[in-house]
Amino acid sequence: MFPVGDDNSQERTVPVVTFALIGLNVLFFLVELSGGDHFITDWAFIPARFSQHPETNAVTIFSAMFMHGGWLHLFGNMLFLWIFGDNVEDRFGHVKFLIFYLLAGIAATFSQYAVSPESAVPNVGASGAIAGVLGAYILMFPQARVNVLVGRQMVAMPAFVVLGLWIALQLVSGVGTIASTDESAGGVAYMAHVGGFISGLLMTFLFRGSSGTGTAT
């Protein structure tokens, strides 16, 4: 299943923060491409390096959120942010949504760090922060209809089904990566996805304030 859109007919505001985050991610990736391996080494979050010198590497917690491992990685993340971010931003408000996004990214980074603090593999990507957005979306808009590609057919499915299957896959894959002893190769930081998603769920109770649970949009 591949999400391609949802119903935004009830949105009240223009999602300027979502648009800005997408623009920053694309811009940062272009800079990353021009900077090559040295740029990645300098600005990616590397757990082993952070363990040794956390004070000088703290900035990479944020810079790594805007870096990606390739065009497909970037496209997938920005698509998810485009589909789900605008609804959450509409409910939280612009400033709260930006803070929420960054906090989810931080939580995701440290979730991955907790299971591999001595890894020398660079961690990059907005996936953890976006997983937090998905956590907020599934809690506030569980019945929202999400259009997904299933084979060659477009099917509208409830958000709790689409995103529930997504997080289940992350949990299963995350358990597998914890059991793995190979620290030399890169891959998907599944525990960052899990940590970001759970933090998004929890923070939603704080960030949505008194607006209550969401109706489907």
Image (spheres, rainbow, N blue to C red):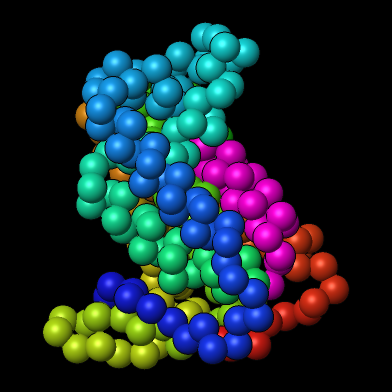
| Residue 194 in magenta stretch | no
Pick the quarter of the image with the N terminus. Answer: bottom left
Q: Quadrant of residue 135?
A: bottom right
Q: Position of residue 72 (x, y in %)?
A: 23, 52
| Residue 108 in magenta stretch | yes
The outermost residue toward the left is 152
Work out whether 122 lies above or below 147.
above
Q: Residue at x 72, y 56 (%)?
A: 96
**Residue 199 visible somewhere in the drawing:** no
- Start-end of magenta stretch: 91-109
Pick the quarter of the image with the C terminus. Answer: bottom right
Q: Position of residue 130 (x, y in %)?
A: 49, 55
Q: Residue at x 48, y 31 (%)?
A: 63
Q: Residue at x 28, y 73 (%)?
A: 2
Q: Is residue 55 left or right of residue 152?
A: right
Depth check, front residue: 31 or 131: 31
Q: Residue at x 75, y 61 (%)?
A: 207
Work out whether 133 lies above or below 105.
below
| Dominant secondary structure (helix, strand or loop) of the stretch shown in magenta | helix
Work out whether 130 lies above or below 188.
below
**Residue 22 visible somewhere in the drawing:** yes
Work out whether 154 lies above or below 83.
below
Q: Quadrant of residue 83?
A: bottom left
Number of numbered callouts drawn: 0
Depth check, front residue: 16 or 196: 16
